[in-house]
Amino acid sequence: MNQPQPAKSPTQRPVRCFALLPCAGVGSRAATSQPKQYAPLAGKMMVEHTLAAFEAARQIAQVHVVVSPGDATLRKANAFWNVIDGGGATRASSVFNGLRFLLASQTATREDWVLVHDAARCLITPEQIDALITACLPDPVGGLMGVPLPDTLKLAVDGRSAATIEREGKWLAQTPQMFRAGVLHDALEPHAERDFDGITDEASAIEAAGLRPLLVLGSAQNFKITYPQDFALADAILQLRTRGVASHGGESALSIPELNTP
């Protein structure tokens, strides 16, 4: 398949970057009393920390959140984000519905970039978002944030370690994942009839379309809150960042040590 190329029409408006956050899951493994993304964390709902990072990112034009139909939790006056009632049964369906809205409403063009990010990765920073955008803007495909696999990888059979798998060249995928709106829509569309079976992230759809996304180094702190114990770790990191910002006179504290960074 030919690599997608940006349109070169002199009358075309500048290409923009949109954030798209699927926010319709329930997070059953987190054992929270409400959908995980709305659980309290360091004085705010988890998703509010995520949204704040995208608001502060220099190169994001608009932020869109895809929620379950009828979910009014994030419908707030004067919010900087837009709420899309397009949440589906799976994460991929929510993303696809969000893309369809952006394109059908002409909010975004097919050439604009979309950064899809997990609402539960609330430790993402504006600097990391801007770094991904800077790396992907000149790329013909786009890419995703991730980290090289730091630990020994085992193959489990019946609860026992059956083999050690070579970790060279293996990465842990993270979000944001950044692709052109039209390319990502077209990559997801063939999988809609099968309820996006096998599509675990946006990059997997792009790969299935025959393209190879760029890998951009992320951070071990950009983990997805999944289990109850993850809340305590995320809260500790957010508290450290808050104290760091205060001690730096309002500037972003970049000296906080990474946790288990490869």
Image (cartoon, rainbow, N blue to C red):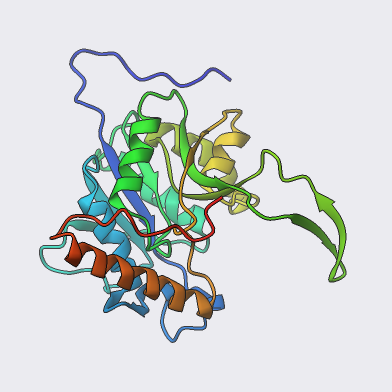
Query: On the picture, is 143 further left or further right than 75?
Result: right
Query: On the picture, is 62 further left or further right than 97?
Result: left
Give the percent coordinates (x, y) of residue 81: 22, 57
Query: On the picture, is 135 further left or further right than 49?
Result: right
Report which quarter residue 100 is drawn in.
top left
Give the percent coordinates (x, y) of residue 94: 44, 56
Residue 121 visible, this angle: yes
Q: Residue furthest left?
A: 78
Residue 240 lies, with reference to residue 262, above or below; the image says below
Give the percent coordinates (x, y) of residue 234: 41, 71
Relative depth, front residue between 50 and 200: 50
The residue under the point 46% across, 47% down is 218
Q: Residue furthest bottom?
A: 33
Residue 83 visible, this angle: no
Residue 9 lies, with reference to residue 161, above or below; the image says above
Report which quarter residue 99 is drawn in.
top left
Quadrant showing the N terminus: top right
Give the percent coordinates (x, y) of residue 248: 18, 59
Relative depth, front residue between 237 and 130: 237
The residue under the point 13% across, 60% down is 249
Relative depth, front residue between 249 and 199: 249
The residue under the point 31% across, 75% down is 45
What is the tally of numbered marks visible in this picture? 0
The residue under the point 49% across, 56% down is 220
Residue 204 lies, with reference to residue 91, above or below; the image says above
Query: On the picture, is 30 further left or further right than 13?
Result: right
